Each structure stands twice: as C-alpha cells, then as structure tokens.
Image (tube, grey):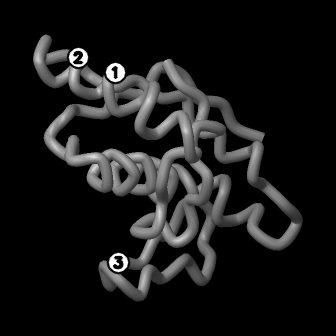
Amino acid sequence: PHSLGILSNSSPPSSASFRQGYDIHVIKPMLRFLKDSNSPFMVNPYPFFACTSSNLDFAVFRVNSGLFDDYTKLKYTNMFDAQLDAVYSAMKVLGFEDVEIVIGETDWC
C-alpha cells in the first residue's frame, strides 16, 4: 500500500497528480502491471495527517461546510472521500482510471 505522500497535490481532488518523477518512472509502470494482472492499487489514506484546527470537522466526518471542487462540481463533506477521489484523479491523469483502488489501512485523530 502507498501513503498519500505519493501525491504532489490533492486539493481540489480533480487537480491531483502523482509526484513528478515517480509518476512516469514508478507509478505508471506499476499501474500498468496492476491493470494487466487485474489487481487493485492499494493506498493508506490518513485524514489526520492533513488535519488542522480549521478542518477538524471535515477530517473526522462531523458536520462542516465541505469542500467544493469547481471542475467536477462535487461537494466533499469529509476528507476521506476527497483523498480517495484525489488518488483516482491522479490515476486518471496517467490513463489508469479503470484500476480499482483498495484501502490498505487508515486511522483517525
């Protein structure tokens, strides 16, 4: 499983991409292998790593104003969903939006 440290940006989710250098030389060949072997891409999202006093409710699934993605017109009410869509968007940039994403582990603050 991969930490979300593999992303260079993740907000809004539709703008996410993998870190430059790793994207083409590491992640893309790995995604090709996973697609060819019908295997999932595993990630470990940890919303608390990005948790601050200003987004605590967003990180722990409490009522909040949410995050609106202007490109997709989606409103995220929790960081977990936003993080997973960021991974999906980064995979889509590389042409692998059809590879399943599986959660390896997660934790909460």
Query: Residue 18 at x, y = what percent?
Result: 50, 46
Residue located 62% across and 76% down the image: 64
Residue located 60% across and 83% down the image: 65
Note whether 90 is above or below 28 in the view shown: below
The residue labelled by disc 3 is: 74
Instruction: Judge the density around disc 2: few (<14), some (14-19), many (≥20) Cα neighbours within 10 Å.
Output: few
Instruction: Please state which of residues 75 and 7 is positioned toward the viewer in this rendering.
Output: 7
**In the shown orientation, is residue 82 left or right of residue 65?**
left
Query: Residue 36 at x, y = what percent?
Result: 11, 18
Q: Give the quadrant of residue 75.
A: bottom left
Q: Are marks 2 and 1 in contact (CB under 8 Å)?
A: yes
Q: Earlier in the sequence, mark 2 or mark 3?
A: 2
The image quadrant where one finds the C terminus is top right
Note whether 44 is above or below 54 in the view shown: above
Instruction: Judge the density around disc 1: few (<14), some (14-19), many (≥20) Cα neighbours within 10 Å.
Output: some
**In the shown orientation, is residue 21 left or right of residue 104?**
right
Residue furthest to the top = 37
The residue labelled by disc 1 is: 30
Q: Are marks 3 and 1 in contact (CB under 8 Å)?
A: no
The residue labelled by disc 2 is: 33
Q: Secondary structure at mark 3?
A: strand
